[in-house]
Image (cartoon, rainbow, N blue to C red):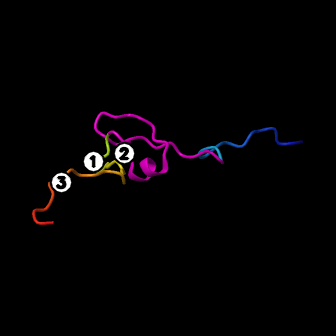
Amino acid sequence: MANDQQETLTGPVPGLRRRVWCRGVGCHHQLYTAESRRRRYGPICDPDYRTPDPDHDVDQDPIPGL
């Protein structure tokens, strides 16, 4: 007689990534980007979040004598 029972699943379905949730206070958003998933913070809750803006120029007064 053949075994007609299905094997039980003991973990996540193969091929799917594990869900990662933001650990910010009161934030329950799922994280999708690699950087957010690694840091475990979303872009809004991340305490070290800085916008990479290479074209940022600071207004400065000219140096006297030059």
Q: Secondary structure at mark 1?
A: loop
Q: Image check: 24 left or right of 61?
A: right
Amino acid on which disc 2 is placed: Tyr
The residue stretch that appears in magenta: 15-44
Considering the numbered disc 2 on the image, is that residue within a helix, a strand or a loop? loop
Return the disc, 2 or 3, that comes first in the chain's sequence.
2
Question: The C terminus lies in which quarter of the figure?
Answer: bottom left
Residue 54, x across and y down, in percent:
36, 54
Disc 3: which residue: 60
Query: Does 18 lie within the magenta span?
Result: yes
Asked whether disc 2 touches disc 3, contact meaning CB atoms under 8 Å apart, the reply is no
Nearer the N terminus, badge 3 or badge 1?
A: 1
Residue 12's mark?
none
- The local crowd at label 3, few if under 14, some if 14 to 19, many if 20 or more residues have their Cα within 10 Å, is few
Task: Look at the image and tell me in which quarter the N terminus lies.
Answer: top right
* Res. 41 mark: 2
Q: Main secondary structure of the magenta part?
A: loop
Q: Secondary structure at mark 3?
A: loop
Outermost residue, bottom side: 65
Relative image position of residue 35 (x, y in whole percent): 44, 51
Kind of residue at disc 3: Gln
- Report the disc number at residue 47: 1
